[in-house]
């Protein structure tokens, strides 16, 4: 059974999580997702030698991008497990997008690296990769620099794809994402994530759901954004997105909105992703563990009551 952990902050209704709180949520999430009893064991199970990348989603600037505090906390945990700081690479399609979202760029040989594909000397790898209806060059950062990869998207509604989560976030890894938006990104979002450098290096998905744009995404619209105060963690990229879709649909329903399918933009690419073996999209085949962080620093089980 595929496993997804949903970790809620101390006060989810605030929709704000700081670096230290992310650190606690991530530590617990890594252990739950990998079914291990310590952070060290989780990191050892997930990552081998070499650089660990984190693909962010920074298209919307500071208002609705992967929080800097989240990637900082992930980096802290990796360094705690003796990963060299310079082997941590936070990346996005362009350096400009990272800066607009509040990230401090660093392409030096010391410290954690943070840069866009456009700042790499090669920009994209020299080889085209193909799967199904996709044929693309992939970011040189992922092809040439990164050994193990963490996808760190933001959970939100998407005006074309329906759902924007982990699979859709990897459009930022290829040189021609504009070709892959027909039919609500189906099957393209699945096939992009099946490209060998993306599929083979994926180790973990961490979806930020501190605040959720439940309608009129992927841009920022304050009147259709709700605080949620959680992260979604899984080694299965399709299961992580499927649980994200479940949460998004519940939020939409609570605000009197139709389902994404009724709105004419179903996230059908998740079914295609499951069909080609990227992961599990059926909720009855996914074990979802929900826990809430308490003021004591401990976690308690949380019912699915939203």
Image (spheres, grey):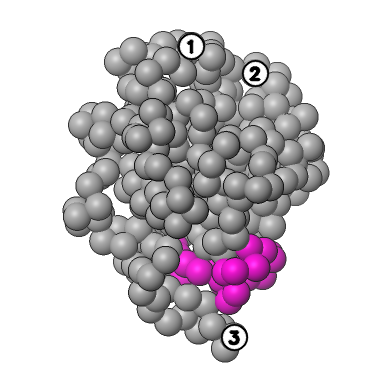
* Residue 29 is covered by the magenta coloring: yes
Of helix, strand and loop, which one carries label 1? Answer: helix
Residue highlighted by disc 2: 123
Residue highlighted by disc 1: 179
* Residue 231 is covered by the magenta coloring: no
Question: Which stretch appears magenta?
Answer: 7-30
Task: Give how far apart the Cα atoms at labels 3 and 2 are.
Answer: 45 Å
Of helix, strand and loop, which one carries label 3? Answer: loop
Q: State the image coordinates of residue 73 (x, y, percent, origin top left).
A: 64, 60
For residue 90, say whether it is visible.
no
Residue in the foreground of this view, choosing between 24 and 239: 239
Please state if 257 lies on the left or on the right of 154 as rendered: left
Q: Main secondary structure of the magenta part?
A: helix
The answer to whether residue 70 is above or below residue 168 is below
Between label 2 and label 1, give the one nearer the viewer: 1
Please state if 221 lies on the left or on the right of 138 as rendered: right
At 42% from the left and 82% from the top, the residue drawn is 300
Task: Give how far apart the Cα atoms at labels 2 and 1 are.
Answer: 19 Å
| N-term-proximal mark, 3 vs 2 | 2
The quarter in which the N terminus is drawn is bottom left
At 25% from the left and 44% from the top, the residue drawn is 280
Q: State the image coordinates of residue 66 (x, y, percent, origin top left).
A: 63, 46
| N-term-proximal mark, 3 vs 1 | 1
For residue 175, say whether it is visible.
yes
The furthest residue to the front: 256
The quarter in which the C terminus is drawn is bottom left
The answer to whether residue 13 is above or below residue 274 is below
Residue highlighted by disc 3: 295
Residue in the foreground of this view, choosing between 17 and 254: 254
Image quarter for residue 121? top right
């Amino acid at each position: 059974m595929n496993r997804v952990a949903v970790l809620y902050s101390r006060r989810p209704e605030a929709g704000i999580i700081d670096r230290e709180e992310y650190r606690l949520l991530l530590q617990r999430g890594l252990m739950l997702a990998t079914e291990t009893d310590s952070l060290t064991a989780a990191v050892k199970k997930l990552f081998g030698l070499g650089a660990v990348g984190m693909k962010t989603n920074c298209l919307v600037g500071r208002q609705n991008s992967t929080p800097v505090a989240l990637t900082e906390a992930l980096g802290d945990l990796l360094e705690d497990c003796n990963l060299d700081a310079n082997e941590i690479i936070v990346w996005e399609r362009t350096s400009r997008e990272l800066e607009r979202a509040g990230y401090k760029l660093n392409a030096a040989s010391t410290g954690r690296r943070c840069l866009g594909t456009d700042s790499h000397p090669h920009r994209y790898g020299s080889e085209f990769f193909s799967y199904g209806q996709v044929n693309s060059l992939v970011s040189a950062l992922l092809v040439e620099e990164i050994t193990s990869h963490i996808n760190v998207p933001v959970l939100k509604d998407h005006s074309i794809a329906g759902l924007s989560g982990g699979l859709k976030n990897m459009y930022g890894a290829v040189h021609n994402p504009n070709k892959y938006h027909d039919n609500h990104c189906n099957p393209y979002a699945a096939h992009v994530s099946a490209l060998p450098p993306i599929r083979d290096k994926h180790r973990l998905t961490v979806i930020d759901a501190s605040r959720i744009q439940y309608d009129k995404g992927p841009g920022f619209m304050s009147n259709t954004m709700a605080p949620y105060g959680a992260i979604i963690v899984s080694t299965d990229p399709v299961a992580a997105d499927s649980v994200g879709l479940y949460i998004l649909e519940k939020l939409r329903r609570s605000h009197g909105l139709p389902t994404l399918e009724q709105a004419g933009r179903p996230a059908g690419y998740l079914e295609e992703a499951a069909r080609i073996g990227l992961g599990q999209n059926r909720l009855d085949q996914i074990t979802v563990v929900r826990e809430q962080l308490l003021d004591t620093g401990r976690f308690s089980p949380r019912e699915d009551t939203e």
